[in-house]
Amino acid sequence: MLGGLARWLRASGYDTAFRHGIDDSVIVAEALETGRMLLSSDGPMFERKVIRDGQLKALFIPQQLSRIEQLAYTVDKLSLKRLPARCMACGGELQEIPKHSVLDEAPPLAYRSCDTFFRCKRCDKLLWRGTHWQTINARLNDILKL
């Protein structure tokens, strides 16, 4: 339900975990094990004892919200601040790499028009500050009031 929110939180600088089709008990166990906060739109999830008793921090995200509204809601409820962007695919930390090192890997247009490239330390994905990054950044600036 919240895969889009997970990607927006990663763009905001938060290492979020998300997998499709995972069982609720596995989600709860992993959140407890890793110390992560649970975000969900699944009402029955919040009836679990570990959440009711406060052993597992959790935030209910109303289902009717759009992805951007989910992000704004989460930012407001958790008082989130903007951090350096993370990999949108896996949430890994991004490391800036020299432009010349991606000559054979980056798309030609990206290589010609961008000066800054990054590689995810977790999944090795190559990223750059192209128009998509700029669009996401502008939207985040609006939501995070920067």
Image (cartoon, helix red, strand yellow):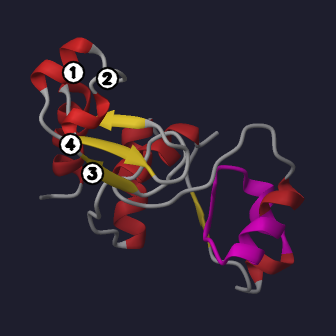
Give the x, y percent position of residue 49: 85, 78
Place residue 82 in its image quadrant: bottom left
Say which residue label 3 marks. Answer: 96
Q: Which residues are magenta?
A: 28-48
Query: Is disc 1 surrounded by few (<14), some (14 to 19) or many (20+) residues within 10 Å?
Result: some
Query: Is disc 2 surrounded by few (<14), some (14 to 19) or many (20+) residues within 10 Å?
Result: some
Viewer-proximal residue among 118 and 5: 118
SS category of the residue bearing label 2: loop
Asked whether the beta carbons under mark 2 and mark 1 sit within 8 Å of each other, the answer is yes
Nearer-N-terminus badge (2/4): 2
Query: Is disc 4 surrounded by few (<14), some (14 to 19) or many (20+) residues within 10 Å?
Result: some
Give the x, y percent position of residue 125: 46, 37
Q: Quadrant of the N terminus?
A: top right
Say which residue label 4 marks. Answer: 137
Residue 79 vs 11, above or below: the answer is below
Viewer-proximal residue among 13 and 123: 123
Q: Amino acid at mark 2?
A: Ala
What is the C-alpha distance between the residues marked 2 and 1? 6 Å
SS category of the residue bearing label 3: strand
Asked whether the beta carbons under mark 2 and mark 4 sit within 8 Å of each other, the answer is no
Query: Is disc 3 surrounded by few (<14), some (14 to 19) or many (20+) residues within 10 Å?
Result: few
SS category of the residue bearing label 4: helix
**Numbered label attached to residue 106:** 2
Asked whether the beta carbons under mark 1 and mark 3 sit within 8 Å of each other, the answer is no
What is the C-alpha distance between the residues marked 3 and 2? 14 Å
Q: Amino acid at mark 1?
A: Ala
SS category of the residue bearing label 1: helix
